[in-house]
Amino acid sequence: MAQEKSYKAKDIQVLEGLEAVRRRPGMYVGGTDIKALHHLVYEVVDNAIDEALAGSCDEIDITIHSDESVSVYDNGRGIPVDIHKQTGMSALEVVMTKLHAGGKFGGSGYKVSGGLHGVGVSAVNALSEWCEVEIKRNGKVHFQRYERGIPQADIKVIGKAKATETGTNVKFKFDPTIFVGDLSYRFETLVHRFREMAFVTRGVKIRFVDERTDRELTFYFEGGITSFVRYMNRHKIGLHKVVYVEKTIENISVEAAIQYTDAFTESVYAFANTINTIDGGTHLTGLRSALTRVINDYARKHNLLKGNDPNFSGDDTREGLTAIVSIKHPDPQFESQTKVKLMNPEVQTHAQQVIGEAFSTFLEETPSAAKAIIQKCLTSARARSAARKARDLVIRKSALESLTLPGKLADCSERDSNKTELYIVEGDSAGGSAKQGRDRHFQAILPLRGKILNTERARLDKILGNNEVKALISALGTGIGDGFNLEGLRYGRVIIMTDADVDGSHIRTLLLTFIFRYMQPLIDAGHLYIAQPPLYLITHKRKLRYVYTEDEKEQFMKTIDEGDKVGLQRYKGLGEMNPTQLWDTTMDPENRTLLLVTIEDAAEADRTFDMLMGAAVPPRRRFIQTHAQDVRNLDV
């Protein structure tokens, strides 16, 4: 019998102060991965944005230094430095070292803020190797340094400041013992976040400098979220001017910008106290409800919907919609510390009222725009009805039934979806090698013939008429669009495996476009991967070596003595590998490399797919001309 572990009063641990953050970082910043690393920056910048919302700041400077430390400066009031009576510490030290401490609880320091739990900057401090804070306040420059959350000395005055000069500069270096691995801040990820912040915090200048690569960008938008909608739609054709409304009800500010376009997809983003609530919430529900109700009321009133015609559904009224809804609430309730979903029920009522009134007025005053929007809804409704009928013929009834699985699918014997994986393979040749080389127990193969439809330029009813799309939907078992159900997924990993040439890249992009538009939860839940077949087979001294990148090849070639005979084979297609080679290099879980597909910024991903795959040619031409010199090894 195993020895019983002790479980007595002495075994109960109480984590004091910031030690709780260091032991359980996932509770405070969402984990210890690259996403959590960026969240450290967001928490500090959110505090600066809160100063802007309080009307005390109009400049924010963020700098990534060469050693991966980060500085965030704002010209706000500066964190107070006088003694906090309750603790006997300086207010700065309380804010930096005590959880649930801040000026955002009583309502006197901030009417509206994004930092609400009082754990943001103290959590960053706890998870940093070191953190230094400079405060300009009362004509002095105050300073304090912390290491892993612990003050190294009392706060001290290190200089003078002008009487009118105030502000806070927080500089920190993430702790490599917590954020383990080759982690580094991504310039593009931070740029997207800061651009969004500038859009929803009108009149604030955000300057971002990356000293590692000598890059700098400054964001300033007088137009606020109206500019945001124009930015999102710059590759689309708008059906009308941007509709903008801002109104405060019971201390809750509701702001929205709305424009319908010629696109087939919806691009709607919601913010609460400048924070992008990526999972939506009550403000997003209010926006959608208002638009659906107003459009149906207008269509009935003006006889554009006849007596027996069914009302437009929410999906019908959102096709081609680009909208931003931004609320500012004195006491917002979020689903978690990472603030991905707004929960306040009263916000839905206020958002629906404010947006409904403004959009109804717009339709009445602009009948030409109203007619264009209603016509788009009518076309969408007809297409959706056709798509529904087509979908019923395509989608399997459940993951347990073997009905309607495509004949080209080589299924696996394992039925536990947590243990299975589906390779989506380009062409019959590669499909044949993959079928022969796979482990039939848990690996299924779906070969696609030719290129699937470009789903960025077609409605769902047309998409569902494409045989390759039908095969993919049937194989996955989840349904698509509003009928998507992740519980029906038949494979825990869905792996796109295409050739390393132009056609392979195009097919991969077409698949990613379709999945992003109609199966996005598949990506959000971490089920979608891209296989990484080798680029070269190097033969040297009767030994075979596969290399996966150009740099890896160059490094290996440097290790070979001059004059040695070397064989170099470039793999353009998966079909060039025999089944054993394909298994050894690309499909064997012990040896392969898979890239997990993630969406770090949905708004930017939306814009990128629209630019690369949409109908407008000039933006795509500019992109190709700009990046043509960066392309390597396509059809070599």
Image (cartoon, rainbow, N blue to C red):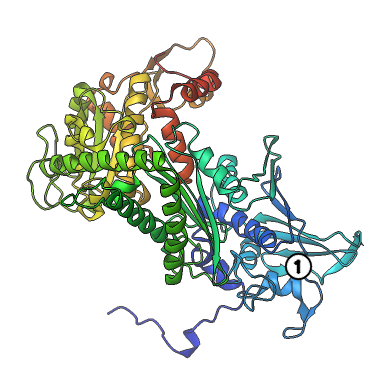
Residue 204's spot in the image, x, y percent? 69, 51
Nearest the eye: 137 or 541: 137
Q: Where, by quadrant of the figure, is residue 78 drawn? A: bottom right
Tell me the residue that label 1 is attached to: 79
Q: Where, by quadrant of the figure, is residue 93 drawn? A: bottom right
Mark yes or no: residue 516 visible: no
Q: Is residue 239 above or below residue 628?
A: below
Amino acid type, label 1: Ile
The residue at the point 37 percent across, 19 percent down is 502
Q: Is residue 358 above or below residue 499?
A: below
Residue at the bottom extreme, as displayed: 9
Q: Quadrant of the C terminus?
A: top left
Residue 55's spot in the image, x, y percent? 71, 61
Q: Quadrant of the N terminus?
A: bottom left
Residue 45's spot in the image, x, y percent? 65, 56
- In-image side of 286 versus 308 (left or right): right
Nearest the eye: 269 or 259: 259
- In-image side of 44 versus 252 (left or right): right
How many numbered dots are placed on residues in this image? 1
SS of the residue under disc 1: loop
Mark 1 neighbour class, 10 Å CA radius: few under 14, some 14 to 19, many 20 or more: many
Mark yes or no: residue 162 visible: yes
- In-image side of 297 versus 15 (left or right): left
The residue at the point 69 percent across, 76 percent down is 108
Residue 98's spot in the image, x, y percent? 65, 75
Nearest the eye: 544 or 445: 445
Q: Where, by quadrant of the figure, is residue 129 drawn? A: bottom right
